[in-house]
Image: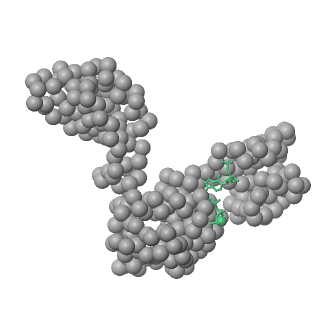
Amino acid sequence: MIRFAVQSKGRLNEESLKLLKDSGIDVDDTKRKFIGKASDFPLELLYLRDDDIPGVVAGGSADIGIVGFNEIAESGADVNVVRRLGFGKCRLSLAIPKNADYNGLEWFEGRSIATSYPSILRRFLQGKGISSSVREIRGSVEIAPAAGIADSIFDIVSSGGTLVSNGLKEVESVLESEAVLICRKDLPEDLKPVLDSILFRFDAVQESRGKKNVLMNIPTGRLSEAMSLLPSMRSPTVMPLAIEGWSSIHTVVDDSTLWETVERLKRIGAEGILILNVDKVID
Ligand code: PRT
Ligand code: ZN
């Protein structure tokens, strides 16, 4: 049985559980307690506050877990980061009052900075040779300048809307973060195959995200033209149709180029174009 720590509520909870579910690991989430058991996989879920996950995994009370990379960087927990998971993307940034003149990092010299991430901030300032007064506060960091608690802040930013609505502007981005899968360094031998199986499933789910399966019929004479329009596609399959002079193409296209590609294919005579969701991709 592998013990897997996830955030009990908050920004990473839903996506973490969805990733498990899409990987065929179903945990009864209806009566959420501290621990949940997967019905069809040797896994127990531990629901924790995100701040506690790095330490719990480093200490071995959980074997693996999902947490924001920012929490790993702040805690300095001795764990292995085994995968970036592509959700919970954000950055840790320095922000100052919007009307202040910003002249580069020297602005922070001798000034105060409120943050919930003092270790990352101190390390950054030290590396840049800047001395500031770091004021650690928990929560609502963005109100610190208006409340007269500090001159500036160092906090998580994603859309930037919170900064704007608090009269602040982002001036330096210090650390990029996203949800990561972490693992204890001394994972017992008997749990390694279980971790491998989880990684295999997570990779297949992640690989399928942002992709569509495209099927179409095309006059055989236009095949080479069609193939030249499919640079991002992975090994298209071409099959002759029962009707003379027509072929069928099956391929996978990235969402980012889907419409452009399909429109071009249509222009060179593609018909019966089917666009289907890709459920899993196993390389
Ligand atoms: O209760 P618990 O301790 O478990 O949760 P928490 O309240 O400490 O964390 P939570 O759920 O807010 O965030 C969990 C993780 O989500 C963080 O550690 C980050 O890795 C990640 N994440 C991604 C974010 C954001 N995006 C984010 N936008 N965490 C916080 N925010 C905050 C941001 O600081 C701002 O105040 O959300 C607000 C809105 O951001 P803007 O820039 O979109 O306006
Ligand atoms: Zn937290």
Q: Quadrant of ligand 1?
A: bottom right
Q: Taking 60 as reference, is 105 left or right?
A: right
The quarter of the picture where the N terminus appears is bottom left
Q: Taking 241 as reference, is 166 left or right?
A: right
Looking at the picture, the colour scheme in use is one colour
Up-down relation of residue 48 to residue 16 (above or below)? below
The x, y position of residue 241, in whole percent, is 13, 31
Q: Residue at x 26, y 20 (%)?
A: 269
Q: Nearer the viewer, residue 210 or 103?
A: 210
Q: Residue at x 37, y 49 (%)?
A: 208
Q: Residue at x 53, y 68 (%)?
A: 6
Q: Nearer the viewer, residue 197 or 44?
A: 44
The x, y position of residue 42, in whole percent, is 37, 75
The x, y position of residue 188, in whole percent, is 41, 79
Q: In which quarter of the image is residue 49?
A: bottom right
Q: Taking 142 as reference, is 231 left or right?
A: left
